[in-house]
Amino acid sequence: MAGLNRRRLLQGSAGLLAASARTGWAQSKPEKLVLVCENSLAWKRTLIDEVAPAFEKANGIKIEFTMLPVDAWRARLKAELSAGSTGIDIAMLSVQMAGWMGQHLLDHNEVVAKIMARDPAFDWDDFLAGGKVAGTYDGRLVGIPYRLTAQILQYQKALLETAGFAEAPGTFAEFEKAALAVNTPPARYAFGLMGKQGAGTFTNSVPWIFSAG
């Protein structure tokens, strides 16, 4: 999600920087906007080499990038926002961060309305409904989705069949039963889930829970 605060960035260019505001600047148009995000983004070159220069050319405002490893990025946002800092204008956030970040962010329903009024080609209906739901906290849209990922269960059909299961588990109860049947550590662990950095385990398990209602 792209979260925006401080200067009420309401109009703008493309991508994550799609919110700036001439109406809000009046006599105090900023020289730069600070973006804090994680540095493993595959598309960060697009942001730095294409989007930011185009935004600066169109608005006369430079984008200052602060790109950090996952844990440092989250710690920086939590520390500065909790302290009431006004040094961050734009922030990337994951849905599990919405609870503690939401109070520091604009209501993006208002941001989207401003963008659509300025640019008729911006179609909010093009965004998947699930992304909008994930980006909503306490009835407020706290960010605009830039990426959605799908969690897919991959399994070894032959291994399950050998253990007596004709098909992949369809419920958590079936999943637990199948996992216990094939779990023979340290030679084989029944299930693997990414969870090394940040809230990886949470991020990759929540979609399972969410999809189950």
Image (tube, grey):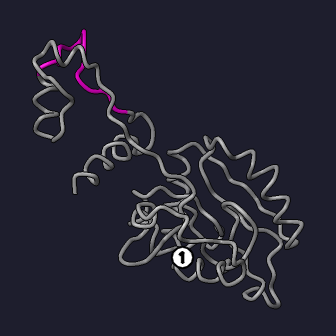
Residue 50 vertical placement versus 187 (above, below): below
Q: How many C-alpha atoms fall within 10 Å of the one at disc 1: few (<14), some, or many (≥20)?
A: many
In which quarter of the view is residue 169 placed?
Answer: top left
Q: Is residue 29 left or right of residue 138?
A: right
Residue closer to the observer: 46 or 126: 126
Q: Is residue 6 left or right of residue 167?
A: right
* Extent of the magenta region: 181-193
Q: Residue 73: percent from the left, percent from the top?
A: 56, 51
Image point 66% across, 49% down: which residue?
67
Residue closer to the observer: 24 or 78: 24
Image point 77% across, 62% down: which residue?
63
Residue 118 vertical placement versus 53 (above, below): below
Residue closer to the observer: 39 or 2: 2
Residue closer to the observer: 36 or 40: 40
Q: Residue 185: percent from the left, percent from the top?
A: 20, 14
Q: Residue 204: percent from the left, percent from the top?
A: 36, 42
For badge 1, the amino acid type reads: His
